[in-house]
Amino acid sequence: MRRDPWGLGLAGAFAVFAAATLGLWIPGDVESGIVETFRRRTTIGDAMAPTAAAAGMLAAALALGCAAVLRPQRAADPLDRNSLLFVARMAAVVGAGLVLMVHAGPLAVEAVNALGGGIGSYRELRDTFPYKFVGYVLGGSVMVAGMIAVIEQRLSAAPLVAAALATLALAVLYDVPFDDLLLPPNGDQ
């Protein structure tokens, strides 16, 4: 039985990143805790979402590491040009999605203001419908549909619709139950 070196390396890298996020980044950068209580009112703190994400990443990294050790592995595939192109395409899709996620909401507000809407700044509207969803849904949809297109090596309508619906569902599930949470990246605006 041969261990999977790529799986072990990826698992190790993500485990180190998740542990550093949990142990260093979140405590050093986030002012409030996971849960905050003020005057007998308990709310979700700013550290809740990144802590849950980093803990999930750590669990996935540990599962990947266990799978890389326990499953039999055939001879390692060489790192060739196609593998590097695949990684570059995926990185480009994620980068494009993140750029849209950060800038689409403010651009939408600027467009409405340019057309005579006079609705104010994005900072004032970042927690109002529909502006709070624009960047998250558009950027997330591009990421999901783009990854599907890279894997399938073609772009079709079904993944676009599925990605938009899934991202919208996540936005609603993440936003509606919690009064004090802002969808990413609205908390940074």
Image (spheres, rainbow, N blue to C red):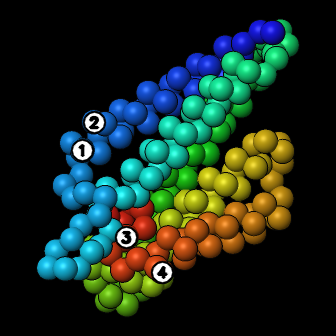
* Residue shown at 69% from the left, 72% from the top: 165
Q: Quick check: 119 above or below 2?
A: below
Name which residue type carries label 4: Val
- Classify residue 93 as left or right of residue 95: right
| Residue 7 pos. (x, y %) | 66, 23
Of all residues, the one furthest to the front in this rendering is: 40
**Going by the image, does 174 lie left or right of 28?**
right
Q: Which residue is mark 4?
A: 176
* Cα–Cα gap, marks 2 and 1: 6 Å
Q: Are marks 2 and 1 in contact (CB under 8 Å)?
A: yes
- The answer to whether the residues at label 4 and label 1 have Cβ atoms under 8 Å apart is no
Q: Which residue is mark 1?
A: 27
Q: Position of residue 41 (x, y in %)?
A: 23, 79
Q: What amino acid does circle 3 point to?
A: Leu
For disc 3, the marked residue is 182
The residue labelled by disc 2 is 24
Figure quadrant of residue 115: bottom left
Few, some or many residues within 10 Å of mark 4 (<14, 14–19, 20+) = few
Image position of 101 (left or right of 94): left
- How far is mark 3 from mark 4, CA to CA? 10 Å
Residue at (41%, 77%) from the top-left corner?
Answer: 178
Front-most of residues 6 and 81: 6
